[in-house]
Image (cartoon, rainbow, N blue to C red):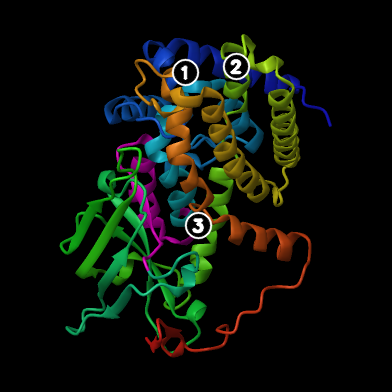
Amino acid sequence: MNFDDTPEEAAFRSEVRAWMQANAPHELEAELQRMGFGSAGASMEASKAWQKKKAEAGYSCPSWPKEYGGGGFTPIQRVILAQEEGVFAKLSGPFTIGHGMCGPTVMHWASEEHKRRLLPPLVSGEEIWCQLFSEPAGGSDLAGLRTRAERAADGSGDWIINGQKIWTSGAQHSDWGLLLTRTNPDVPKHKGLTMFFLDMRSPGVEIRPIKQANGQSHFNEVYFTDVRIPDSQRLGDENRGWEVSLTTLMNERAAIGGSMSTGFPELLELTKMLELDGRPAVDDPMVRSRLAQFAIRQSGLAYTGMRSLTALSRGETPGPENSIGKLVAGSSMQEIAMFALDLMGEAGVVDDPEIAAREGWFQAVLMRSPATRIEGGSDEILRNIIAERVLGLPGDIRVDKDVAFRDIPTSGRKN
C-alpha cells in the first residue's frame, strides 16, 4: 500500500496548499482548533463566507460536476483537498447534510431543470438543506414512518402532506429538505413510500427546535399540516421512495463515517497535563493500559480509512469501510470522553470553558456523543448491515416483511 502522492497529485496538493494559505480565514484558526465535537460552532456568517470562497475556486463539493457548481475533481483529489483544508473544514458543518446526503440524491433523481436550479446554491452555501426522515414512532425503523402524502382533491396532481418528523438536524436554518412520506399503506412498508424535496418555508411547515442536554438546539421537530407539494418535486416513482432513500443513506454513512474524530489525540494530551498521585497521569499503568486500548482502536480506524483511500485512488467504490468507521468511531468517542472526565475527578463536572480543563472540550463531546450512535444509522442497524451484507450471516427474522403497513399492530392496535 503506497500512500505517497504521484507527481500529479503532489502538484495538485501544492496548488491547494498555496490557495488555502492565501484565502483561509486564519483569524479563526485558534478558535477552530479549540472547537470540539458538540461545541457551539462558528457563526453562520463565517461559515457561509468560507463556503462561498471555496465554491468560487471550485473547492466546494470538489467531486461534483462543474455544471452543478462542483470542481469536477477526481476522488483522490477530493481527499487531498480535505487534508489540506484541515481545521477550516469545521466551518462547513451547516452544509454537511446538504453536500453529503441531499445533494447526491437530488443529482441522481431530480430533473435536469431542478438540478441546475438547486445544486449550485447548495454548493456555494447560499442555501442549506436538511433530511426529513426520522419519526417519533419509528425508532430506527425508517420504513415504519407515518407521515402521509395524499393526492390533492382538486385534481391538480399536487400532494398534501400531514405528519411529523423528529431529530431533524439544522431544520431551523434550512431552505430545502428531503422528505420521505407514506403514499400507500396497503402494501408492505418498504413498498409504499415516496420521496419529495420540500421548500421549508411552505405554508403548514412548523419547526420546533429541541433543547438538548448541552444547551444547544441542533435537532428539531418538524410538523406538516396540509402542506402542498407539486408533483414535479417528487424524486423517483410514486411508491418507490425506499429506493431513492437508499441513495441518501449510502451517502450518509460515507459522509459521517469517513470524517468522524474519536478524540484520542486530545485524550493523550490531557493525560500528559493531568497529575495522579503527584505524577503525570500518562505514567500510571492503568491509564496507560486504557490508552493502549484506545490507540489500537484508533490505528484500526486509520488503516480501515486507508483502505477506502486506496479504493478511491484506483477509481473503485469503497466497500463497508465507512459503516465500520462510523460504528467504531461513535462508540470510541463516547468512551474516550467518559474516561477523560473520570481522570479529571470532581473537576470533570465543570464545563465552563473559562475554567475547565482543555476549555471544556471533553465535557462538550460527552454531552453530544450519544447522538452519534443513533444518527446516520444506529449501532444496532450498522451491526446488522455489516453482519448480513459484509459477513454474509443470516438476516434478522422480520415478521412484518410481507404484511401491509396498515395491518402491522402498533401499541396494541392496528394502524
* Mark 3 surroundings: few (<14), some (14-19) or many (≥20) residues within 10 A: many
Residue mark closest to the camera, 3 vs 2: 2
What residue is at 35 percent from the left and 30 percent from the top? Answer: 40
Image location (x, y in percent) of residue 79: 62, 31
Image location (x, y in percent) of residue 256: 54, 44
User: What is the spatial separation of the Cα atoms under label 3 and label 2, in whole angstroms?
Assistant: 37 Å
Question: Circle 2 sits on which residue?
Answer: 269
Q: What residue type is labelled 1?
A: Arg
Image location (x, y in percent) of residue 77: 62, 30
Asked whether disc 2 touches disc 1, contact meaning CB atoms under 8 Å apart, the reply is yes
Residue mark closest to the camera, 3 vs 1: 1
Q: Which amino acid does label 3 sit on?
A: Thr
Residue 176 falls inside the magenta stretch = no
Residue 57 in view of the camera: no
Which of the numbered marks, if any, corresponds to residue 358?
1
- Among the two numbered marks 2 and 1 on one chain, the one whose residue lies closer to the N terminus: 2
Q: Measured along the vertical axis of the image, is residue 396 above or below residue 154?
A: above
What residue is at 39 percent from the left and 46 percent from the top? Answer: 119
Q: In terms of depth relative to the viewer, which is nearer, 381 or 98?
A: 381
Asked whether disc 3 touches disc 1, contact meaning CB atoms under 8 Å apart, the reply is no
- Determine which quarter of the picture holds residue 342: top right
- Among the two numbered marks 3 and 1 on one chain, the one whose residue lies closer to the N terminus: 3
Which of the numbered marks, if any, corresponds to residue 248?
3
* Mark 2 surroundings: few (<14), some (14-19) or many (≥20) residues within 10 A: few
Q: What stretch is highlighted in magenta?
A: 107-136
Q: Measured along the vertical axis of the image, is residue 415 above or below residue 170?
A: below
* Mark 1 surroundings: few (<14), some (14-19) or many (≥20) residues within 10 A: some
- Determine which quarter of the picture holds residue 67: top left
